[in-house]
Image (spheres, grey):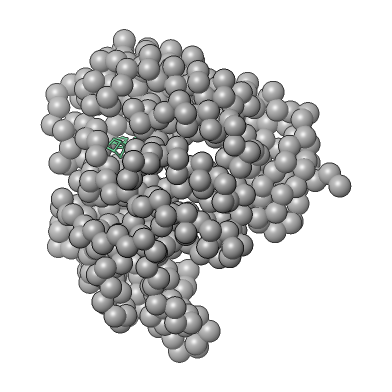
Amino acid sequence: MSSTTQTTPMAPIPLSRKPSGRADPGARTACIRTFGCQMNVHDSDRIRRMIQDAGYAEVQRYEDADLVILNTCYVRENAVDRVKGHLGELNRLRREGRVKKVALTGCIGAAEESATLQQTYDIDLVLGTHNTYELAEFVGLPTMQETYTPELPGTEGGHNAFVTIMTGCNYQCSYCIVPAVRGRMICRPMGSVIGEVENLVAGGAGYITLLGQTVDAWRHEGKRFCDLLEAVAESAPRVWFTTSHPSNMEDRTLRAIGEQDTIVKRLHLPVQSGSDRMLKVMHRGYKAERYRRKIEVFREAAPDGTLSTDIIVGHPGETEEDHEQTLRLVEDCAFDSAYIFKFSPRRGTEAAQLPGTVPDAVVQRRFLEVLRQVEQNAFARNQRKVGGVEEIYIRHGSTEDGKAIGETWSGHAVHVETNIAPGAYVKAKIESAGPHVLYAGEPLE
Ligand code: 5AD
Ligand code: SF4
């Protein structure tokens, strides 16, 4: 496990601010592919700024790129399989003399698996999540060893900005590779977070998402996550955070979601299983009853809010009774959405060594049963929104069908018939609903 040399000055450390080399016709070109979670999307933003500062023009296709950067995910095996597919394709393009250099960054880069990949594929540089700054030297920028801390500012200028408040994770969930590849928790000082939020808002950002593996575990100099969230909610017009851990989630935070106008009433709280026995095997540190109580507080604080979760089916040793308890919890919590994962053994995690493998066919059936239960609830809850008028924040501009994707204050995803620019708010009537999204008509005057 790599650890970070922590340099945590109060002010964000700026990357070099040379103009980007986008417009230079003979410029070197780079293509960034991002796999996995929001943290990786955010890390790719940092990488993007490095390559632009180094004078690379960003391109979208491998065949147009001198340098390809694969920013990878390791959390489940299928994520690795996808990356292998891309590496195979890149080997072919190199043989044809198109792509010149390949860099592998992110969570696979931080895992032992990267050494095996290097033996099979042509990879010029492997970086983990704690030394992304070394890419700077590789692309011809001055060495910036000090810049990889949670201090490094992220997305800038867009209407929708991500701000990392902590990195790493201090839990040791049986199945999870994250602590091995992202290291232990490092929390960013409050002043630094607020400073960045204020800069982003002054630069036009209308939506701030606070990021980290367990944001609600954030604490610094006597302050806790809720203090930070409340301060950010004072400074930004719209705020959300992800992802949280039930053991850290305070009732105070749940109430703040309901009370503060600027916080989106949407909670992502991974439960993983509804069975106390499995939660213990997974080392999650809470029982199903405690999770249910948290949800009651959230539903009371934000009755129209949306709740999502992560669930793993088929963890080693999961019995039919455990599965039934997960179904029961899904029914009781009436999630608005859920990410359901089939257990995927990750080398180096405890669960990869555990007996009691669940046969594939059983995993598939349980997966579908949980999915069906989630979708039934979500559909019924979404139906209740039909006929109402909502204020909708436009996240993504309209596509060919003339529909933009927005979000209500309660955290519902909505398709709206408008070509207004992202970052704007519109009011529109919800005309219909599916299990995953609401559909609104044209905005009202
Ligand atoms: N197998 C299946 N799902 C996993 N997750 C993490 N590790 C694994 C694994 N080995 C899921 C968890 C976590 C989400 C990000 O990915 O549900 O909350
Ligand atoms: Fe992984 Fe558990 Fe940490 Fe989440 S809390 S990142 S599942 S170890």
Task: Depth check: give the residue in front, 225 or 179.
Answer: 225
Q: How many marks?
A: 0
Residue shown at 41%/28% (left/top)? 250
For the point 50% across and 46% down, which residue is it?
Answer: 231
Q: Which x, y percent locates residue 339?
A: 44, 33
Question: Where is residue 310 shown, x and y percent of the image?
Answer: 40, 31
Seen in the picture, residue 240 relative to 362 is either above or below; the reply is below
Residue found at x 46% / y 47%: 210
Q: What percent of the width, then of the height, locates residue 102?
A: 29, 70
Residue 357 in view in this figure: yes
Residue under the point 58% across and 59% down = 201
Q: Position of residue 433 (x, y in %)?
A: 68, 31
Which corner quadrant of the figure contains ligand 2? Answer: top left
The one nearer the camera, 123 or 145, is 145
Q: Quadrant of residue 83?
A: bottom left
In the depicted view, which residue is nearer to us: 114 or 198? 198
Can you say whether 268 is above or below 2 in the image?
A: above
Q: Is residue 58 left or right of residue 142?
A: right
